[in-house]
Amino acid sequence: MAQIGIDEWVARSGDRRDDGSGWRKLLARADARVGWWQRLALVALVGLIAGQLLTNVNTQTVAFNSLLYAMLALGLNIAVGWAGLLDLSYIAFFGLGAYGYAVLSSTATGSGGTGGIHLPAIESIPLVLVVAGVAGVIIGLIALRLTDDYLAIVTLFVGQAFMEVVNNIDPGTLGGVNGLFGLDPLHSFGGRIESPIGFYYLALIMVVVLAGILHQLDTSRTGRAWRALRDDPLVASVMTIPVNKLKVMAFSFGAIVGALAGTVFAAQQDTVFPTNFTANILILIYACLVLGGVGSIAGAILGGLVVTIGEQMLSSPNDAGYLFYGLILIALVVRIRPWRRLAAVVGGVIALGFAAHAIVAAVSSSAVAGAPGSSGWIGSAVRDYVIVPANPATYGNVLYVVLICALILLMRLHGTRRLIAVVPTVYIAACCWESRLIVNPAITTQIMIGAILIVTMAARPQGLLGTRRVETLQP
Amino acid sequence: MSPLLELDGLSLSFGGLKAISELDLHVEEREIVSVIGPNGAGKSTVFNVITGIYDPTEGDVKLGGDSIAGKRPYKITRLGIARTFQSLRLFLNMSVKENVKSATYGKTKATPLESILRLPRARREEREVDALAEEVLSFFGQRLMGYRWDQPAYVLSYANRRRLEIARALATRPRLLLLDEPAAGMNPNETHEVTELIGRLRDELGLAILVIEHDMHVVEGISDRVVALDHGVKIAEGSYRSVARDPAVVEAYLGRDPEALAEE
């Protein structure tokens, strides 16, 4: 006889999951068996191997940047993901760390390009972190009385204030808009790190150690208290948790991690400018965290990698083409089942393009006189496919608006109609890409990251590696 | 000897509205006291004042003879008063076990640095907290045990959520437990179970319990004493039998007898 209080069917849910086959279940089973430090070791190993494979300076710098953003996302996750405080002042601590390192390791406080403070990293970085921690406590204390939107507004102001201060304070010290340059390389105990690959390995070690520390913190009483406070601050305080103290701690810890990232960033870049710490960068850090999964350590790291590498690919027209067409193809393959329909849609897209190109070419040869923006084999493949007039700017702008309308329409349609509407939409997207988007990589990067975020959030609101959350309704 | 909990002339006003006026109430060690009254009588507000969510406008709250009025909620709970919420306010995104463990924050002392390095004190406290969590969860038989530990609280059924609320309150190691409608929304079987549970909490853990309840069968089954409130004023106090027959209580629930009204 079953024991009272046990629902046998529910109790066996774990067994049923384990009994299954297929790669998804294999993955789930392996996932359940591997401990956190083994995963971390795996990340470190992959990082080390990647380091060996990165041979040119550009890719090494991109790799360093992706780890830097992973670190920034990890720090942001403390206040935003765990304690549930929408902290927009984070960028100020990143800046504080960078400027702190710059002042302590350059000729900034000297005169005529000589003198100044030149502390070794082992002294300057801890000093900067202590200052950042104290600054975090102060901002936290100011922010205590505020929640949600109000907290966001006030902390956003703090972030902006940092920029204004740096821009306008005595230009002899912080350099104003010209920034500070000629920083010392990261040095301590006679050793120094100067090469991009050196910074990559340094960042790798930092991310791995930081992830380990944060995991230990997450599973401790402090981590539990943060998550309790995020779900329901009032109840948390009734359950013996000093809510105010923990909020300030979350701010302060986040500030320290942000500042740590700042010091490494400054040392690697060799210069600091106020424009390194704008709201744009803050949004990018948020994008990393949201894409990876708010509240997840692995998610923050993955988010940092995906956003930085994605951004890098998008800024080079050739890679951007692969990303663009690749994502469309993946989306079609994943969303359209069975394969017959998929084949019909893909065939339709191809046929529509060549037919449209042929018709337009027959009517007016100047309408197809322009060359597609892509170069390489993609460029030659779509030469007789997309319609690009001789002067594509206005045409491309109009097409962009049409594309947005088509996408909105697509979302309103269902069933076969949607399937049919996919065909012209993809074709419009291709024409728009070749005639306009690819020509301005800087702007297209922003648009594409936005689009990727929207699509990911719609498909997976908890982010790539996040866990689903329910919101507590406050009565 | 002073009683465990004593409310002394307690009043609470929100602007011109007197939510509680001049309330005297006491709970002895190992005593179960029920608070009854129609909706809006101020029962939950009394709980909110005792646990420090509101500060009393006048009067005093004493725990074991010492005033706790005006203290922050987390300090009051650390002194030995735990509560559940009528509206079920679990940490929904945390697992069952974590919900309980989060309430042990006040009983543990490891600093973040100790936790990160897993120093001896952090490890010992974590073991103790784990054992405590299993102990309080096992109070409900098998209902919150085993595979349920790692489930997020939001997948729990309504009755299990109520149980988890009680388990979480127990994890703070209270002397006095405040239960806000523990049987609300439960079926007759579960209601019966709650009645037994409240008795066990007193007998096995030696708790004093102050309980708000609308289900008169539960009130009858558990109470050493019953206090009736209406409009924030105590209108009756005594055994269940005497309070249930008190004309003021009957009037508060049912209104006045029309014939008696006509005679006036």
Image (cartoon, helix red, strand yellow):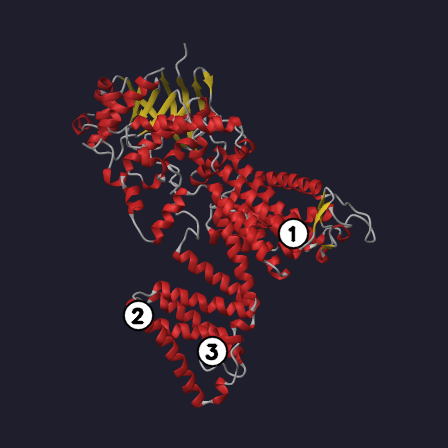
Residue B42 in view here: no
Q: Which residue position holds label 3? A: A381
Residue A203 position (above or below residue B64): below
| SS at mark 3 in the image | helix
Q: Which residue position holds label 1? A: A198
* Quadrant (top left, top right, bottom left, bottom right) of the C terminus of chain A: top left
Q: Earlier in the sequence, mark 2 or mark 3?
A: 2
Residue A253 position (above or below residue A329): above
Measuring from the top left, give residue B198's x and y in whole percent.
Answer: 29, 23
Q: Which residue position holds label 2? A: A341
> Quarter of the image holding residue A8?
top left
| SS at mark 2 in the image | helix
* Quadrant (top left, top right, bottom left, bottom right) of the N terminus of chain A: top left
Q: Earlier in the sequence, mark 1 or mark 2?
A: 1
Task: Tell which of A172 and B44 is nearer to you.
Answer: A172
Q: Earlier in the sequence, mark 3 or mark 1?
A: 1
Measuring from the top left, give residue A425's x and y in whole percent.
Answer: 40, 72
Residue A87 position (above or below residue A457): above
Task: Tell which of B232 and A440 is nearer to you.
Answer: A440
> Quarter of the image holding residue B40?
top left
The three-letter code of the residue at mark 1 reads Gly
The three-letter code of the residue at mark 3 reads Ala
The three-letter code of the residue at mark 2 reads Arg
Question: Depth-wise, is mark 1 or mark 2 nearer the camera?
Answer: 1
Tag 3 near tag 1, CB within 8 Å: no
C-alpha gap between disc 1 and disc 2: 51 Å
What label sits on residue A355 in the rendered view? none
